[in-house]
Each structure stands twice: as C-alpha cells, then as structure tokens.
Image: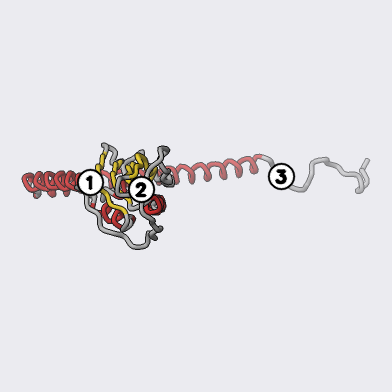
Amino acid sequence: MALPPTIPTSFVPKQPVSSGMRKQKSGLNLLLIGSSALLGIATLVCAGIFGYELYLKGARDAKQAELAAAQRAVDIDTVEGFIRLRDRLSATESILNQHVELSEFFDVLEARTLQTVRFSNLIVSVSGDRSAEIEVEGVARSFNALAAQSASIAAEKRIKRAIFSGITVNDNGTVAFSLTATLDPRIITSGEILPGITDEEPVPAAAPVAPASPVSPGPATTTVPAARPATTTAP
C-alpha cells in the first residue's frame, strides 16, 4: 500500500546540523594566541631588563675608570696642603667670631653718658658663653643728673638689668654711685651668638634713691637733658 505524499517517509533532518566541536576549537585557538602574545611580551621585557643591566654595568665601569684616572692625576701633597689651609682658616674664623671687642660697647657708653656724669672705674667680666657683666663706679653732679643718667641707661636695649647702688653724697655736693649691668653678647663680639643665649627684653634701670641718712645740702642744681653725649674712658 502506497503512502500518501504528505506523510514523511524519513525523520532524518535535511538541513545541516551545526556541531559544538567547532566552537570549542575556536576558543582554544584564541587562548593559544593570547598565551603566545603574553609569552612574547614577557620575553621582550626580560631581554630589555637584561640589556639595561649590561648597560648600567658598562657605565659604572667607565665611571670607575675615569675616577681612577682623575685620582692618579691629583698630587697628594697638594691635596694635603689644601686640607691644612682649610683647617687653619676655619680655626681663624672661629677665633675671630668669638673675639671680645669692646669698641662698640664704649661707643654706646659714650653716647649714653651725660656731661654731668663722670665714670672713675670700669670692670668688664666676660664668661665662656660670651655673656658679660659690667661694674662701674662714677660721680654725678647732683641727684637730678644721676636720675637723668639712670633714664638714659634704661633706654639702651643692649644694656640690661642696670642697677644703681651705693649712692652717697660727697663733701662738694656731688653724688657718688655704683652701677652693675648685663651686656647683650652682640655688643662685645663680632660673630654669631652661641647657643643658649637669648635676646631678652631689657629691664629698666633702677632709679636712684636718696640716702637714708641725712646729708648736708649741696649747691642748687638743675636737671641736665641727656641729649648731648660725652666721651668717657676706662682706667
């Protein structure tokens, strides 16, 4: 019995069936290509590092050879002479920087001394750190002149902690006094201040006080302004 033409006689598909094996093979090819590329890059990097290392070694050897040639060309006696000269100059500079110079202090003292005041004795004591103290003995024409001198000293910032003491009246009416003070290290040295020395604010000088015991009145006096300095000398 013949089958109608509408009934298929075979169930095998006539269209080509795609196989998954080809996709797996394509993926393996891509992985292989990527691995080969990475391997090539790594090889090039290693070769570059190795070549740069050889270059650095060659440059180092060349510099060492140049240094050795320069050392052979230098005279050892000349180098030792330069070293001795440098040490001498350094020692000389250190000595000069710490050398005590009183010329600036005398200029300041001259500018701050009134014409009605005379200094009869001066002692300057300098310690190892270049801090200095002064002890001065003097005579003023009157108490007013001594008060003006105290104000003049107090106005000088480089003379600190000035104290007037031992105030007595002489037979001729003049006033004898003693002065102690601390000097700024920069006023007696030309170099840098040593560590530990600070720039403190000046302490105003103590105003002179009349002696407690009664004294005979002296001649009439007037206050003399401190604008005109006078030259003073130390014994």
Q: Are marks 3 and 2 in contact (CB under 8 Å)?
A: no
* Drawn side of residue 60 relative to residue 112, left or right: left
Q: Are marks 2 and 1 in contact (CB under 8 Å)?
A: no
Looking at the image, the residue that sits furthest to the front is: 216
Q: Nearer the viewer, mark 3 or mark 2?
A: 2
Q: Secondary structure at mark 2?
A: strand
| Residue type pointed to by label 1 | Val
Report crowding for label 2: few under 14, some 14 to 19, many 20 or more residues within 10 A (C-alpha): many
Image quadrant in which you'd find residue 127:
top left
How many badges with numbers are in the image? 3
Rounded to the nearest whole Å, what is the CA distance between mark 3 and mark 1?
108 Å
Asked which colour scheme the image uses, the reply is secondary structure
Q: Which residue is mark 1?
A: 100
Quadrant including the N terminus: top right
* Drawn side of residue 135 relative to residue 149, left or right: left
Q: Which residue is mark 3?
A: 18
Which label sits on residue 159? 2
| Residue type pointed to by label 3 | Ser
Rounded to the nearest whole Å, what is the CA distance between mark 3 and mark 2?
109 Å
Of the image marks 2 and 1, the number of the one nearer the N terminus: 1
| Residue type pointed to by label 2 | Ile
Which label sits on residue 135? none
Report crowding for label 3: few under 14, some 14 to 19, many 20 or more residues within 10 A (C-alpha): few
- Above or below residue 116? Residue 97 is above
The residue lying at 39 percent from left, 60 percent from top is 225
Q: Nearer the viewer, residue 125 or 205?
A: 205
Q: Nearer the viewer, mark 3 or mark 1?
A: 1
